[in-house]
């Protein structure tokens, strides 16, 4: 079993910050561990597109257990999966 190196961007980053992801992938094309980044929800889809076909996994920072509903500001597991997430911090 490989170890996991995970990073939580918390409430940091904009679209311009995705260049950091490209630099990480260039520096570690065949990592010895699993890599997971959890950006803010506004960057999930773009980061997943950047990471597609690479060893980098993208995750959400949190989720609500309901698949849908009147939960202002929340995001469901289905929404995360639909945007390319394979993990979530809960």
Image (tube, grey):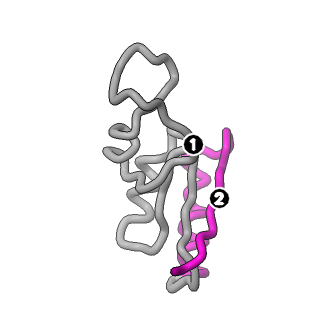
Q: On the image, numbered disc 2 is attached to which residue?
A: 7
Residue 84 on image: x %, y %: 37, 52
Left or right of 14 on screen, residue 49: left
Could you say which quadrant of the image residue 49 lies in?
Answer: bottom left
Q: Looking at the image, which residue is at 49% across and 17% down? A: 72
Label 1 secondary element: loop
Q: Which badge, 2 or 1, comes first in the chain's sequence?
A: 2
Residue 58, above or below 5: above
Q: On the image, numbered disc 1 is attached to which residue?
A: 90
Label 2 secondary element: strand
The reply to whether the magenta stretch includes residue 67 is no
Q: Give 83 or 62, whichever is nearer the viewer.
A: 62
Crowding at label 2, few (<14), some or many (≥20) Cα neighbours within 10 Å?
A: few
Q: Give 75 or 90, whichever is nearer the viewer.
A: 90
Residue 65, above or below 31: above
Give the numbered dot on residue 67: none
Q: Looking at the image, which residue is at 36% across and 37% down? A: 79
Question: Total label count?
Answer: 2
Farthest residue, direction front: 1
Q: Looking at the image, which residue is at 59% across and 70% down? A: 4
Farthest residue, direction top: 70
Residue 24 on image: x %, y %: 60, 72
Residue 67, above or below 11: above
Left or right of 8 on screen, residue 71: left
The reply to whether the magenta stretch includes residue 11 is yes
Q: Looking at the image, which residue is at 38% across and 27% down? A: 66
Q: Circles 2 and 1: CB distance less than 8 Å?
A: no
Distance of mark 2 from mark 1, alpha carbons?
14 Å
Range shown magenta: 1-28
Q: Quadrant of the C terminus?
A: top right
């Amino acid at each position: 079993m490989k170890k996991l190196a995970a990073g939580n961007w918390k409430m940091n980053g904009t679209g311009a910050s995705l260049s950091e992801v490209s630099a990480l992938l260039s520096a570690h094309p065949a990592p010895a561990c699993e890599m997971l980044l959890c950006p803010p929800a506004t960057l999930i889809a773009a980061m997943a597109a950047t990471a597609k076909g690479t060893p980098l996994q993208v995750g959400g920072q949190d989720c609500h257990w309901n698949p849908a509903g009147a939960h202002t500001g929340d995001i469901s597991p289905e929404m995360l999966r639909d945007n390319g997430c394979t993990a979530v911090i809960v």
